[in-house]
Amino acid sequence: MNTSAATSLVPTSTGHFPKRTDTVIASVLAAFLDGEKLTSLDCVYLHSTTRLAAVVFDIESKYGWTISRVERTVPTNDGRLSTITVYFLLPATIEQAITQGAMPWVSQVKANRATLYVRVKAKRPKAAKAPQGVRDPRQMDLWE
C-alpha cells in the first residue's frame, strides 16, 4: 500500500491517549502507533473485537487522532470479490506521536493487555465446565 502520496495531502493529528490502558481502544491505538495496518478480521484475532470501525470512530472522535483508511478489493473463499477497509496511522503521525512520548504509553498498553489475556486463559477451564445453553431469563430468544 502506497501511503507516501497521501502523507502530504492528509493533515495529521496526534490526539491524546485513553487513560485506561487495558481496553480494546487502547490496544488498537497502540497497534497503530507501532505502525500496524488493521482490518476488521485482524482485530477479531489480535484485539478480540468485531467492531474495528466503531473503535476507530472512538479513537478519532473521543481522543482526537486522525486515522487513515484505504479500501481494498480482496477475493473471498467462494470466488466473489469483497471490499474491505484497511486502517492505519500515517508515518508522519507516528513520528510526531513518538516525539511527544507515545512509546511508554504503548508499552504500558501491551503489558496490561498481556496480563488480561493471562487472567482470561486461567478462567477458560472453569468456563468450559459451565452448563451449556443456560442464559439470563431476561434475555429474549431470537424467535420469541
Image: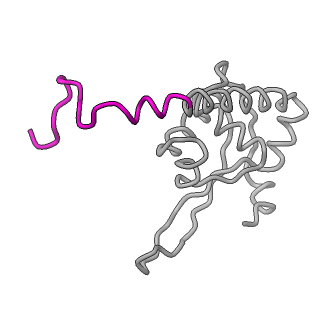
State the image coordinates of residue 120 (x, y, percent, origin top left): 54, 30
Residue at the bottom extreme, as displayed: 79
Instruction: Give me the residue at 87% from left, 29% from top.
Output: 100
Residue at the right extreme, as displayed: 99
Residue at the top extreme, as displayed: 19
Q: Main secondary structure of the magenta part?
A: loop
Corner quadrant of residue 134: top left
State the image coordinates of residue 10 (x, y, percent, origin top left): 73, 50
Instruction: Give me the residue at 53% from left, 45% from top.
Output: 52
143 magenta-colored: yes
Left or right side of 42 for 134: left
Q: Quadrant of the C terminus?
A: top left
The one nearer the camera, 12 or 53, is: 53
Whether residue 103 is situated above or below residue 80 in the rendered picture: above
83 magenta-colored: no
Corner quadrant of residue 73: bottom right
Point out the stretch of residues depicted in magenta: 122-144
The one nearer the camera, 117 or 7, is: 117
Instruction: Give me the residue at 76% from left, 66% from top.
Output: 2
